[in-house]
Amino acid sequence: MDIVNILRDKILNSVNQLVDERNLKQQINMNNIVVERPKKQHQGDYSTNAAMVLGKALSSNPRDLGEIISLKLRDSELISNISLDGPGFLNITISPKFWDRLIYKINSSNNRYGEVSFGGGKKVNLEFVSANPTGPLHLGHVRGAVFGDVLSRLLEFVGFKVTREYYVNDGGAQIDILVRTLYFRYLEKLGEVIELPDESYPGDYLIPIAEKLIERYGNKLKNLEEVERDNNIRSFAIEHMMGVIKADLKSLNIEMDNFFSEQAMIDSNAIDKSISALKDKGLIYTGIIDAPKGKLHADWKAREQLLFKSTEFDDDIDRPIKKSDGSWTYFAPDLAYHADKLNRGFDVVIDVLGADHSGYVSRLKAVINAFAEQNVEFEVKLVQLVKLIKNKKVLKMSKRAGEYILIQDLLKEVSSDVIRFVMLSRNNDIPLDFDIDLTLSKSKDNPVFYVNYAHARIVSIFKRAEELNMWPLTKMENLEKMNLPYMESELALVKKLSEWPNVVKQSARYHEPHRIVYYLNEVASSFHSLYQSSSDSGPYRFIVEGSKELCIKRLVLAKSTQIVIKNGLSILGIVPLDEMY
């Protein structure tokens, strides 16, 4: 029961009637007609610019058109009053009976309230995290991991079929560095005095893996030929590191559907096949690219390379896919990987990347456009950096990692649910400060606490109601017959609950799960305001002994609030707290 869309449909129907009645053939962009909450409460429950959009298209007075639209809308049982404001805004007041029906709908729908099935079963490939398998996950990976997982849950909630995918970058130079570092750690554990080379991974997290290497091979690796030795270490290291990464993800309540190996793709000759397909389309050529812009690079030389005509798809430059020495560029596997995504038949492809990958966006879009045989929605979501703050200081180092704050370090401070909530408390393209002290505080300034406290308060209300044999209820359908008006603070909460389906829809449509966190904070604020309110008759009470009907109505309102909070937290992958500690 999405009041915004219900109201918008009625408004559009009235506009279409008006156009038909006047035999007007002008094209009117209905997408420009919006329905929103007015800034001032006295202006009604909702307002629309329909008369102004229509007036501009027809070169007519918006207020005159607004009067006509008002007359058409007044026939609806949904609307109790309409007024014109300013240059032609229509202010609409909803019938009180609708709010009773809404509360009943929320309770009867329970965990399905808010479902809007516009995904239509379309297949989505959502790639996120994709950290190099060279170490445990750290703070730099957490935000993208949580964002990708919650976006997956959100898209599934609205009817998409989502594949959560991790691209295992196990075919590049970083794996060679991992192998070399691990071998030195292996020799070190065998008693040799070792100094790590400059190009190696710092920190002591590889020492336990070196010990496991000894458990499996003893000192045999020292006596093998370099190629065989490195192959053994490579497969052992990747298997172990991916096990660590999967465990890190699981500790954040994240599970992937597919781990896509870069090396397996290379071994299958997929890069050559992809380039051959582009050659058939006339998109591959041998040429010389211009020198990098800005300051001169001393090591740059003009040389012929194999290039992809990405400028035909609005990229800045054509992209090299093979170096002059015959080896692949970093871009070549990305090209083949995205071709593979399309070959698997996905309708929507979403890449979640760190903000340092912003330069990749245009070339990846070019690849999708070059390979797509049909319309494919493609989007890159860039996730900005996170600063971890404790005792008003930014934390930069971890003893175990030597360079990074690991996920497991963070989990020692706060729970997985807290991490998930905070990581979505800002839009993904805005830098985020994660203040540990704030997340542990018990105040309204702590959004995690504030939302959970609302849920815990509702749980305590129902415990008391059950003790008094006032809950559970079986006849909520009699709400309308009670004819009990809502107090202003109650109605504010009801209106906020009515927004949930539209919040879900807009969050999913624009791939912005942070909207759910914002909304849950607003619901919690509205509930706490009601809980703490008072009137001439005294403090507000959800349990009203001696007035069964009033008690029922208020308890059903509390239950509706609980349902919305639980549904919102469920999409975030968070279990609400029944008690605050």
Image: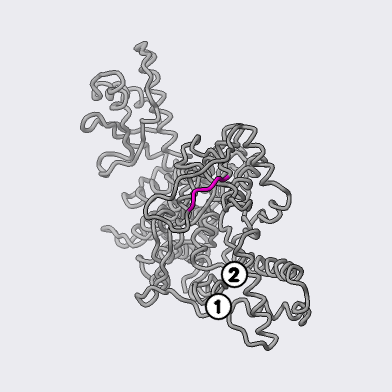
Residue at point 64% right, 69% down?
A: 244
Residue 521 pos. (x, y %): 40, 57
Q: Is residue 304 magenta?
A: yes
Q: Is residue 332 magenta?
A: no
Is 345 on the left or on the right of 494, as rendered?
Answer: right
The span shown in magenta is: 301-305
Quarter location, residue 210: bottom right
The image's mark for residue 493 is none
Q: Is residue 192 above or below residue 41?
A: below
Is 344 on the left or on the right of 581, as rendered?
Answer: right
Query: What residue does disc 2 label?
Result: 135
How many C-alpha atoms fall within 10 Å of the one at disc 2: few (<14), some, or many (≥20)?
Answer: many
Q: Secondary structure at mark 1?
A: loop
Residue 412 pos. (x, y %): 52, 76
- Label pair 2/1, CB-CB below 8 angstroms: yes
245 or 117, nearer to the observer: 245
Q: Amino acid at mark 2?
A: Gly
Residue at point 37% right, 52% down?
A: 294
Q: Secondary structure at mark 2?
A: loop
The image's mark for residue 203 is 1
Quarter location, residue 133: bottom right
